[in-house]
Amino acid sequence: MFQDRDEQRRLEMRHRKEEDDLYRKFQKQREEEEKRIRDEIRDEWEKELERLTNRFEREMQMKRKRDDQNILTLRHQQEREDLEKNMTLRRDKKKESFTRKMLEHERAATAASEYMQAESLYLDHNDDYVEELQPYPSHAPAPAPPALSKFQVKEPNRHDLEIRYHLDAIILEMAHVYNDPVEFANVDQIAISVAQEDQKSFTDLVRQLVGRCGSDIEKARTIFRWITVKNLNTMSFDDNLRGDTPMGLLRGIKNGTESYHVLFKRLCSYAGLHCVVIKGYSKSAGYQPGVKFEDNRFRNSWNAVYVAGAWRFVQCNWGARHLVNAKEAPKAGNKTKSDSLSVRKVRNLTTTTSSTDPKEFIYEFFPLQPEWQLLKNPITKQEFEELPFVRSLFFRYGLYFSDPNTKAVMYTDSTGAATVRIAMPSHMQGTLIFHYNLKFYDSDGDSFDGVSLKRFVMQSVVGNMVAFRVHAPCSGAFLLDIFANAVTPKEYLTGEPMKFKSVCKFKICCEDLQTVMVPLPDCASGEWGPTKATRLFGLVPITHQDALVFASRELEIQFKMSRQLTDFMATLHKNGVEEKRLSKFVSHSVSDDIVTFNISFPEEGQYGLDIYTREMASAMDSPGEKHLLTHCCKYLINSSKRN
């Protein structure tokens, strides 16, 4: 239900007047500060000039020869010129510093100004929708931890269906119990449709955006959808635009004089939502684990918006950045193509966004004001630096560290070993696949003595735990990057392309290496052990459940097939020995549903065993579907007569 349009126009004019008054105040402060700097420099100049003149006069009285007096005069003129240059430089530096501080102050004052906390354009409730669980507060509540980070409310126009809303930082993605948030397709479509036109006032823009929204969550979501759909790379702006209009603010964002956070806050305020801009540090582009926040390189800003009874974080820049970087963008007059494209791309942003749960958000964002951590027990900046460097996908997959003392920088023991352990939720154990990369911390070098550093890491999975045991080949610092992806057995067996994304990074420091490390055998990349065979191929180990096997000169490994597999193959690897020479020492046989691999080792030492297979074709397969011979699992075997 709308308020009267004329009343809203008066409200906007009042906002505009208050904003003009604010900018006049900024101008007065600038003029006063510039005058203070001029007066201060002039006073310093006069004092220094008086000192030089007095010294010159004393020295002239002491010199009788004209030549000496001429030299003194020239020196005095040079000193005076140097003084003038020095004072000019000091004045310019002070002015530059003052200008920078004033800009920061003005942005902060604008973001926090009272006109942004203005009345709502709309009444609290729309009679066409189910009333929300709690009335929206008229005054902004104090920052406090949310009672529930993943919260429940009743969906508008639904009677008994409980919907779980998960607010995603950036796009406020409210994913319910189903995989695809189709229930909010209409809300998304509103934002995309409104983005096809350029509104002249905030009143018109917000009226079009949230006029059909039934909850504060939908309002916030729709506003952000509009921001992410507007592609600044394809927009041109009139230089005469007022800065207090939607297009004027977008022009300022494109020119670097405004920010998305101010725009989001402004729109939320017009829609009747409490919103603030938070300043602090973030582990953003270019950051590596172990880096200290000692300068402004990683300064950042983000929003908190009050919805569903609690403050929720929003990072506007990332959502807008991902859409701006898209190859195609919505174009006016071509709504069908741009609309479908925009919905798809906006939904795809959920894979790159950050969690809004304060306990997870703090891993990437550290506010300057501790209360805006929204944690019961706020942490210090040093503790923030020491937190593991995790990406949003880490929490999206439900991953967590089994050791609560896991830190961003890990130190090896005297043998050069350090282990990172990551736990998975039970519902993800059947689909998550991990990979890793190891390189030197201070360079892109990824090999040591011609051997890939990957071969100095042993990745294994036992139950819900994936472990990465690093054995540093030399003293120094290394960067361990851990990747993950959720795939189905069908995707893996049919050779579907798999893109792994980083979930966390660690700095591995080896200060003193007392033993010589040898690389692992050159097997296929990925995890060691039979877990993958069971998870993706239904191949259950009968004889050896662990990745590491101790054997004598002969070994038998057996599996039980829980579904039909065919064309088994095994390859044996040993450092310094060609794979072809070892092929005759491994064989296999299949009897009913039992697969047996027999290995005889030509000499003692460490071996790697790769096992490959593929699924038998069935009538259920799609036409032309292929089942490729695929890596199934691998073992690390230590052969010795003593075993």
Image (cartoon, helix red, strand yellow):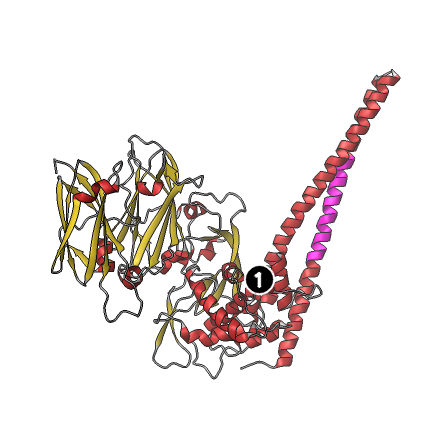
Mark 1: amino acid: Val
The residue located at (43%, 45%) in the rendering is: 382
**Does the magenta portion include 39?**
yes
Q: Is residue 581 left or right of residue 247?
A: left
Q: Where is residue 152 in the image (x, y as percent from the top left)?
A: 37, 71
- Looking at the image, residue 120 sits to the left or right of residue 471; the answer is right
- Can you identify the residue that label 1 sits on? 262
Position of residue 475 relative to residue 250, above or below, is above
> Is residue 144 shown above or below 504?
below
Relative vertical location of residue 465 with respect to residue 251 in this rendering, above or below: above
Residue in view at x 21 percent, y 57 percent = 567
Q: What stretch is highlighted in magenta?
A: 26-46
Residue at x 30%, y 70% (from the top left corner): 622
How many C-alpha atoms fall within 10 Å of the one at disc 1: few (<14), some, or many (≥20)? many
Would you place residue 423 above or below residue 515 in this image?
below
| Residue 440 lies in quadrant | top left
Q: Where is residue 180 in the image (x, y as percent from the top left)?
A: 38, 71
Could you tell me which quadrant the C terminus lies in? top left
Q: Residue at 11% of width from left, 60% of height from top?
A: 592
Residue sitting nearer the eye, 38 or 485: 485
Query: Which residue occupies the foreground of this view, 312 or 407?
Result: 407
Residue 94, percent from left and from top: 68, 43
Main secondary-structure element of the magenta-colored stretch:
helix
